[in-house]
Image (cartoon, rainbow, N blue to C red):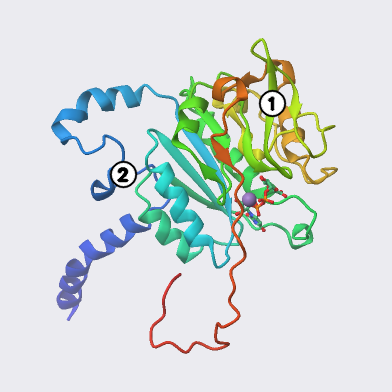
Amino acid sequence: MKSLLFSRFLLLLPWVLVVIVVLDIDSSRAPLPALAPRGGGRPAAARAPPQRRREAALPTIYAITPTYSRPVQKAELTRLANTFRQVARLHWILVEDAAARSELVSRFVAGAGLPCTHLHVATPRRYKRPGLPRATEQRNAGLAWLRQRHQHLPPPQPGVLFFADDDNTYSLELFQEMRTTRKVSVWPVGLVGGRRYERPIVENGKVVGWYTGWRADRPFAIDMAGFAVSLQVILSHPKAVFKRRGSQPGMQESDFLKQITTVEELEPKANNCTKVLVWHTRTEKVNLANEPKYHLDTVNIEV
Ligand code: UGA
Ligand code: MN
């Protein structure tokens, strides 16, 4: 009897191992072969060694994306992954606004085909109100992970961090621009602040003001999508975080940037801030008026 049980266990062992490997979500997996990004359609032999070497020399771009459960979530993440998959050496830090990792996002991450770290932290109920800043805790969780990961790795690998909300639209050129960030870089953002775009005003290669139609008194009149920070700066300012206390609507960016840089120090990108390479698009709330109250379909489909 015992030996029968033992042989059953041996038969099951490979499957147990497969399940453990699949569940290892916090990994910097290489892209899935079927989804191998970059390198176009050229044969593997033609691109492998030199391109790999060039890519290994690039600073890693860390994209911190807060995300929360809603009907359009998977669609947003799909759009984002389709962009990020085309960017060399990009590490996606996806932070769910939830008490636990959801199955939907976990499955999504496992098949996303790019290096991804999946974190979660729930926004306290008292902060889930209109007019209050969103995603403060999630961005801070991403920052904490980044700092912790590099704590024991002297000297830090070159890297660039930016905050990529899940509903914006990102051109591939944006990543080429931000990759050369030395400390903190800035660029225009389209469709934001009640205007077609907002942008830093540049004179002689320096930021001297802001073209904006909304709260021009902000020290850094820029959306979250309009700047990137080098990993060095993040590590050398270990206390720089997004704050709940005293933070007014629309001031999160300024409050954060004030802790790590000055306007004079900013590095203008996108042709001296004259090109829009990212858009603050917002997805319409979906109409579910005809959705049945109880499950009617014969199958259960993830949307
Ligand atoms: C604007 C800015 O572009 C955001 O960077 C800023 O966080 C936000 O205002 C704010 O008010 O705090 P907006 O389009 O109004 O953006 O905000 P959302 O796109 O709805 O949310 C920003 C990010 O936070 C998204 O990635 C979204 O998925 C996430 N989020 C939103 C959560 O994680 N939890 C929420 O409850 C709401
Ligand atoms: Mn948004």
Q: In this view, does 225 lie above or below 136?
A: above
Residue at (56% x, 62% y) in the render: 100
What kind of element bears circle 1? strand
Q: Where is residue 166 in the image (x, y as percent from the top left)?
A: 55, 50
Residue indicated by mark 2: 31
Q: Residue at x 60, y 26 (%)?
A: 235
On whether ligand 1 comes within 8 Å of the CB at mark 2, the answer is: no
Kind of residue indicated by mark 1: Pro
Is residue 88 found left or right of 146 in the rendered image? left
In this rendering, position of residue 132 left or right of residue 180: right
* The N terminus: image quadrant: bottom left
Q: Disc 2 marks which amino acid?
A: Pro
Q: Earlier in the sequence, mark 1 or mark 2?
A: 2
Quadrant of the rendered structure where residue 70 is? bottom right
Residue on which the image places disc 1: 200
Depth check, front residue: 277 or 74? 277
Instruction: Answer left or right for 206 relative to 48.
Output: right
